[in-house]
Each structure stands twice: as C-alpha cells, then as structure tokens.
C-alpha cells in the first residue's frame, strides 16, 4: 500500500511539472514560426532546419540520457536538469537578434529532453499493464493542458509584451517544475548494485525492430507544426489568428490524450496507433484538396486528435516491447531514431515547399504514412 501511494504521488508530481513546462513552451510555440521568419528574417528552409535540428537533438539527448540512466540506475537528476535547460533556453531566445543566435539556445532547449526517457522509464516501472496507458495518457493530457494555458497567455499578452518579454515570462514555469522534481520526487533504490552493460540492436526483438522501422518511416513524413501554421497563413488567416489555430489543436490533444490512453488499455495499442496514423492522413488530404477556412480549422482539430492518439500510446507500446532491464535505453533509443528522422523530415518539407509548391510536403507525408500503417499490422502485441 505505501508503494501504491508513493507511485500515485510520483505520477501527480510529474504531471504537474509537465503542465508547468508545457505552459512555458507553448507561450512560445504559436509565435515561433512568425518570430523566426518575420522578425529574424529566415526563410522556410531555415525554419525547417531549426525545427528539424531541434527534433534531432531531442532524439540524441533522450538516447544518451536513457542509456546512462540504465547504466547507473538513476533517473531523477536527468528530469530536473532537463526542465532547467528548457527554462534557460527561453531566456536565450529573448536576447537573440538574428536567426543564427537561435542555434545554441535551440540546442540547449531540445537538450532539455534528457528528462523524457528516464521519466518515462520511472512511469513504466511504477505502473501495471492495467494502468500504464492511463498513466502515460494522464501525463500527456497535463502536457497539453499546460500548452492550452500557455497559448491563451500568448494570445492575451502578445500585444502588451511582444515577443521577447513573453519569452522571458515563458522561462519561469519550467524553472518551477525543476524545483518540484528536485524536492518532491523520491527515487527508488536500484534492486541490485550491478552496473548494466549497454543495450545493443541485437538485444531488441524482431517485433520491436519492425515497429522501430515503421515509426522511422512515418517520422520522415512528419514535418513540424510550423508548416501547418504557415500554410494556414497562406490560406488567408491573419498572423494574429494563428495562435488560435494552435490552441484548437492543443485543446483537442489535451482532451483526448487520456481517453486514447485508456482505450489502448482495453482494446490494445495497435488499433489506437493505427487511428493516429489515419487521423494524420486525413489532415494531409484536407489541406491538399481544400484551402477553405473551415477545412483548415478542422485540420488543426484532427491534428490534435492525431497527437492524442499517437504520443502517449507510442510510449506505452515501446515500454512494453522493450527488454525489461533496458526500458529507459529503449525509450531513448526509439526517440533518437524518430528525432533523427525529424531533421531531414522538416528540411525535406521546406525544400519541397520552396521548389514544388506548398501542397507537396503533404503528398509526401501521405504516402509514407500509408506505408507505415500497412507495416503496423505485422507487429505483434505482447
């Protein structure tokens, strides 16, 4: 019973810290594409490079932190240090004068994702098969709820504060989150004192390898949300309305993350993941064939549903396919592969946009998504 109480407390503290961090992040995110392109003068290729670089660094930081945390059997330090990096990077954004200045702070920001794999491993370890999807869904729901609040702050205070003061404000919640983890999370002692060898590709089952492969294919077509916002502006939406579209996406993700996590506990992970792929394909189809206001608004809602179905269930599925003693390494390695695909994904999308038209990235993504979903049915659930 004491262990169950401690597990619930740990989940609640992680959920609150995630809420605060995403509150800070999403004060910035709706403004990021316009800040980079309009204020600092970058083009779409540079925007794609910065977004892709960020995702690639996320992947590397998660892989490294997951590997080290499995080796030393320590998790907590990676989590609070990650939140600290996120807060510090936003201070850096606020003092940037040209887009080149963003690069080191973008690296610091995304390196803050060292928190994710160790935190997810803690959640997987203190959860059971019956509530693991629920717990990951709750965490993602709190992420998205924090994002909703951050976007509202962004919309309400942008005209008053402008970009740079808002970015300074965005640093505060993540710094508070770091303090919560440092003071309130008690780390379990390792069950033995052995130092584990590192995981290698051969330690993964064929099932896991196939899922990793199809997820990498999907990630190659999953360009960043920045392209959706710029596409909406191209369709006639004003710059001031873009945060509202981002808010629609985030509210949908916040509301449906927990239900999708619970649904995966009852009907299985694969069906929910397939639904996530289908929802993204619907976004692509809508934006390819219609540039009307209603279609664009609906596409942002479907994009939120896609994120709600994919992100928490993906982590749950990976934690269950992973070797028992290497959950953090497996989660981090999985995110590394996805993130390394994200760098070329956004860069390719930027090139396609500039050379072949704004709809071409959606055609490319639609084809890769269909292939990924077909391969998913060959993956076996435990």
Image (cartoon, rainbow, N blue to C red):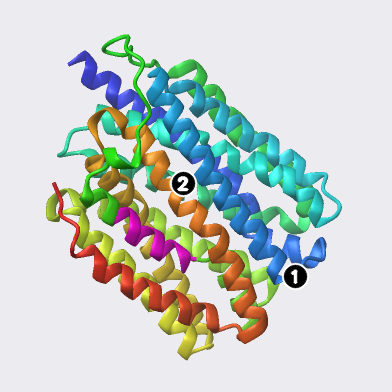
Q: Residue at x 74, y 39 (%)?
A: 91
Q: Secondary structure at mark 2?
A: helix
Circle nearer the viewer, 1 or 2: 2
Q: Are marks 1 and 2 in contact (CB under 8 Å)?
A: no
Which residue is labeled 2 in the image? Answer: 336
Q: Nearer the viewer, residue 60 or 47?
A: 60
Residue 22 horizontal/vertical position (percent): 53, 44
Residue 264 horizontal/vertical position (percent): 20, 52
Residue 70 horizontal/vertical position (percent): 38, 25
Q: Please determine whether, in this image, residue 54 is positioned above or below residue 362.
A: above
Q: Residue at x 22, y 41 (%)?
A: 320
- Residues in magenta? 211-222
Q: Secondary structure at mark 1?
A: loop
Which residue is farthest top?
193
Q: Nearer the viewer, residue 199 or 270?
A: 199
Which residue is labeled 1 in the image? Answer: 43
């Amino acid at each position: 019973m004491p262990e169950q109480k401690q597990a619930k407390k740990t989940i609640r503290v992680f959920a609150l810290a995630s809420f605060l961090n995403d509150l800070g992040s999403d004060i910035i995110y709706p403004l990021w594409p316009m800040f980079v392109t309009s204020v600092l003068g970058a083009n779409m290729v540079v925007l794609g490079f910065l977004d892709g670089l960020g995702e690639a660094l996320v992947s590397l930081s998660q892989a490294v932190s997951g590997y080290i945390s499995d080796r030393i059997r320590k998790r907590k330090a990676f989590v609070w240090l990650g939140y600290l990096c996120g807060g510090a990077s936003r201070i850096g954004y606020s003092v940037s004068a040209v887009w080149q200045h963003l690069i080191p702070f973008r690296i610091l920001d995304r390196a803050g994702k060292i928190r994710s794999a160790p935190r997810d491993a803690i959640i997987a370890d203190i959860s059971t098969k019956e509530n693991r999807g629920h717990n990951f869904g709750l965490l993602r729901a709190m992420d998205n709820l924090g994002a909703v609040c951050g976007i509202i702050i962004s919309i309400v205070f942008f005209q008053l504060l402008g970009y740079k003061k808002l970015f300074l404000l965005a640093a505060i919640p993540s710094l508070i989150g770091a303090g919560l983890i440092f003071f309130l999370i008690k780390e379990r002692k390792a069950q033995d004192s052995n130092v584990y060898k590192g995981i290698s590709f051969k330690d993964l089952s064929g099932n896991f390898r196939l899922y990793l492969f199809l997820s990498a294919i999907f990630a190659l077509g999953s360009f960043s949300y920045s392209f959706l916002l710029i596409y909406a502006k191209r369709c006639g939406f004003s710059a001031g309305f873009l945060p509202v579209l981002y808010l629609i996406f985030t509210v949908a993700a916040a509301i449906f993350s927990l239900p999708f996590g619970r649904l995966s506990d009852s009907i299985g992970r694969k069906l929910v993941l397939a639904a996530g792929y289908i929802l993204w394909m619907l976004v692509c189809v809508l934006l390819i064939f219609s540039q009307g206001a209603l279609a664009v608004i609906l596409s942002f809602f479907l994009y939120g549903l896609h994120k709600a179905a994919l992100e928490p269930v993906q982590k749950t599925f990976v934690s269950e396919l992973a070797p028992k003693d290497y959950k953090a390494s497996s989660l981090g390695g999985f995110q590394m592969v996805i993130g390394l695909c994200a760098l070329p994904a956004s860069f390719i999308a930027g090139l396609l946009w500039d050379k072949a038209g704004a709809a071409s990235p959606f055609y490319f993504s639609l084809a890769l998504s269909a292939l990924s979903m077909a391969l998913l049915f060959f993956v076996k659930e435990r």
